[in-house]
Image: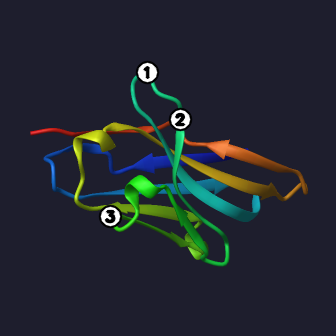
């Protein structure tokens, strides 16, 4: 029905930057809030940033001033620009979206995850 496909993860040195992308496809009527979560080894999944369909944003305190979330509503895509990366940002990053299908049903969907490793 719906797929969220992430890209852009990888290995980067401390202080470096990465840009994650997540594109939604399928039987989509509309997309509400989109967000990025992350899960480090032996830790719970946590919200990193979220953006509403109107463009309002929310960030975890640990990434404020370093990460920027944005979205392209025409292409059902959300981005996460990550600057000044730290070793503690190392995690698997997951895209999440609340989507209304053409059938009228709403679901929350997850991407498959993309690994971000910050290391020298």
Asked where in the image residue 56 lies, by quadrant, the reply is bottom right
Asked where in the image residue 103 lies, by quadrant, the reply is bottom right
Q: Earlier in the sequence, mark 1 or mark 3?
A: 1
* Residue occupying the point 24% across, 53% down: 85
* Residue occupying the point 88% across, 51% down: 105
Q: Which residue is mark 3?
A: 66
Q: Name the quadrant of the C terminus.
A: top left
Q: Specify few, some or many for label 3: CA neighbours under 10 Å numbering under 14, 14-19, or 20 or more.
A: few
Which of these two is toward me, 32 or 3? 32
Q: Name the quadrant of the N terminus.
A: top right
Q: Earlier in the sequence, mark 3 or mark 2?
A: 2
User: How many numbered tags mark residues here?
Assistant: 3
Q: Residue furthest right?
A: 104
Element assignment for label 3: loop
* Residue occupying the point 40% across, 63% down: 64
Query: Mark 3 and 2 residues: CB-CB less than 8 Å, in contact?
Result: no
Image-based side of 20 in relation to 53, left or right: left
Q: Which residue is mark 1?
A: 42
Element assignment for label 2: loop
Name the colour scheme: rainbow
Q: Residue furthest top?
A: 42
Cα–Cα gap, marks 2 and 1: 10 Å
Q: Where does residue 62 sit, x and y in percent of width and height?
A: 40, 53
Q: Which mark is residue 45?
A: 2
Whether residue 27 is visible to the viewer of this picture, yes or no, is no
Instruction: In the rendered view, tell whether residue 54 sits above or below residue 86.
Output: below
Q: Which mark is residue 30?
A: none
Q: Specify few, some or many for label 1: CA neighbours under 10 Å numbering under 14, 14-19, or 20 or more.
A: few
Q: Where does residue 10 sit, x and y in percent of width and height?
A: 26, 43
Q: Where does residue 14 sit, x and y in percent of width and height?
A: 15, 49
Q: Specify few, some or many for label 2: CA neighbours under 10 Å numbering under 14, 14-19, or 20 or more.
A: some
């Amino acid at each position: 029905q719906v797929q969220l496909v992430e890209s852009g993860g990888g290995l980067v040195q401390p202080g470096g930057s990465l840009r994650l992308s997540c594109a939604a496809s399928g039987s989509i009527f509309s997309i509400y809030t989109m967000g990025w979560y992350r899960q480090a080894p032996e830790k719970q999944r946590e919200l990193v940033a979220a953006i509403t369909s109107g463009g309002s944003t929310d960030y975890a305190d640990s990434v404020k001033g370093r990460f920027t979330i944005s979205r392209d509503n025409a292409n059902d895509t959300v981005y996460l620009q990550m600057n000044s990366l730290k070793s503690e940002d190392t995690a698997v990053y997951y895209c999440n979206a609340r989507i209304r299908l053409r059938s009228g049903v709403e679901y929350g969907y997850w991407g498959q995850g993309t690994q971000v490793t910050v290391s020298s």
